[in-house]
């Protein structure tokens, strides 16, 4: 066989790597797509648990959500690491905050609104942004907006209370996230980011020059393994708490608290939502139910925002990447913002 024939029939190393990445991405997408149906079959059909029981519901929630979150962590961290290695951190910073500070926070809020992640699923992107050198205040804006503004949830909310209220929710949610990010950026909070995040480095080639695709893939794999090894216990604990609450807390517990007409309804609703774990699409029906029972819209919205932006499982995950002072400050600022929005909705709606 001639050299020319070998060149035609044998893929180049770069092409083989690209084909491998495409195949891996396809396998990841397939696993993510069949994740829920797979656990349905294993838990309900094979194991025989009843989906209508609390145990069956909690077990399914735990296994399905754990698999989902781990898939997202692995896929997103690898993809971010691979992409980041092609763009210097300085360029990322310039893209977001290079022209005007408002652009960086605005882009973070818009990007967060366009990414349909729950609070736990947003954590991997938060890690990637911090490691890439994006200012902490900007990344916190994204971290708040991403679970808070969900496209499906906004459509469902519009069907419940109308597009005007849904649009106001989007506007106030994004505004609160930007203001919180701007406020937090005024303080020297970077020192309270766990060192394992900030020490993640962009790979270089074997000769110290521009890394090859093989270098970047190897670095992304190593980084993904390191981060998964670090955060997986927090994932299990966080999802376990969420599963227990999801399975055993009565669906009507908020309706029976007797706080609908209380001055403290918004603060109590905000605090009550923290232990729960769901995305906007999952909690909108509950908000609709309590709203229909006479709970003020602002109180119901505070409950929803607290669930999706301050869920206890997400805070447990964030504890691994944030030190306690930063986590406390972040939680306090977001809590106050949610309460302000709740009171605002109760006043104008």
Image (spheres, grey):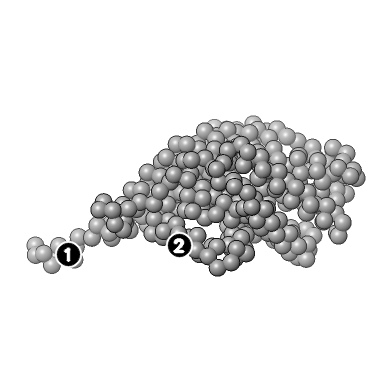
Exactly how many numbered labels are in the figure? 2
Which percent across, then down, holds residue 277? 66, 42
- CA separation in Å, label 1 and label 2: 37 Å
For the residues bearing labels 1 and 2, Cβ distance under 8 angstroms = no
Q: Position of residue 215 (x, y in %)?
A: 31, 52
SS at badge 2: helix
* Quarter of the figure with the N terminus: bottom left
Question: Closer to the observer: label 1 or label 2?
Answer: 2
Q: Relative to 95, is 345 on the left or the right? A: right
Q: Quadrant of residue 274?
A: top right
Task: Give the residue at mark 2.
Answer: 91
- Location of mark 1 (residue): 7
Residue pictured at 51% horizontal, 50% vertical: 130
Residue 31 seen from this side: no
The disc at residue 195 is: none
Residue at x 59%, y 66% (from the top left corner): 100
Rendered view: 20 above or below 264:
below
Secondary structure state at the residue bearing disc 1: helix
Residue nearer the viewer, 209 or 3: 209
Category of crowding for the residue at label 1, using alpha-carbon neighbours closer than 10 angstroms: few (below 14), some (14–19), many (at least 20)? few
Mark 2 Cα-neighbour bin, 10 Å: few <14, some 14–19, many ≥20: some
| Left or right side of 87 for 156 | right
Instruction: Give me the residue at 67% from left, 53% from top.
Output: 183
Considering every residue shown, the one lying at the far left of the view is 1
Question: Residue 89 occupies which quadrant of the picture?
Answer: bottom left
Residue 268, percent from left and from top: 81, 41
Frontmost residue, 260 versus 181: 181
Whether residue 133 is visible to the viewer of this picture, yes or no, is yes
Q: Residue visible at 88% across and 49% down?
A: 294
């Amino acid at each position: 066989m001639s050299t020319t024939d070998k060149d035609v029939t044998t893929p180049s190393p770069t092409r083989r790597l690209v084909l491998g990445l495409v195949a891996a991405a396809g396998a990841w997408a397939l696993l993510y797509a069949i994740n829920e149906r797979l656990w349905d079959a294993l838990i309900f059909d094979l194991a025989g648990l009843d989906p209508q029981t609390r145990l069956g519901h909690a077990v399914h929630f735990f296994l399905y959500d754990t698999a989902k979150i781990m898939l997202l962590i692995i896929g997103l961290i690898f993809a971010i690491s691979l992409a980041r290695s092609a763009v210097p951190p300085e360029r990322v910073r310039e893209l977001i905050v290079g022209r005007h500070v408002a652009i960086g926070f605005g882009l973070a809020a818009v990007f967060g609104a366009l990414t349909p992640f729950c609070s736990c699923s947003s954590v991997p992107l938060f890690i990637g942004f911090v490691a890439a050198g994006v200012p902490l205040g900007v990344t916190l804006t994204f971290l708040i907006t991403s679970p808070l503004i969900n496209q499906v949830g906004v459509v469902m909310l519009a069907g419940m209370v109308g597009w005007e209220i849904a649009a106001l929710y989007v506007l106030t949610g994004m505004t609160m996230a930007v203001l919180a990010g701007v406020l937090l950026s005024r303080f020297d909070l970077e020192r309270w980011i766990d060192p394992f995040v900030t020490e993640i480095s962009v790979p270089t080639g074997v000769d110290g020059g521009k890394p090859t695709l093989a270098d970047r893939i190897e670095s992304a794999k190593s980084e993904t393994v390191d981060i998964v090894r670090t955060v997986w216990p927090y994932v299990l604990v966080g999802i376990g708490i969420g599963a227990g609450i999801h399975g055993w807390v009565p669906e009507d517990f908020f309706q029976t608290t007797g706080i609908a007409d209380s001055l403290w309804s918004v603060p109590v609703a905000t605090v009550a939502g923290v232990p729960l774990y769901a995305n906007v699409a999952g909690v909108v029906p509950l908000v609709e139910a309590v709203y229909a029972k006479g709970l003020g819209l602002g109180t119901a919205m505070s409950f929803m925002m607290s669930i999706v932006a301050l869920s206890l499982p997400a805070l447990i995950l964030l504890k691994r990447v944030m030190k306690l002072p930063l986590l406390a400050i972040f939680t306090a600022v977001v809590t106050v913002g949610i309460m302000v929005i709740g009171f605002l909705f109760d006043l104008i709606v």
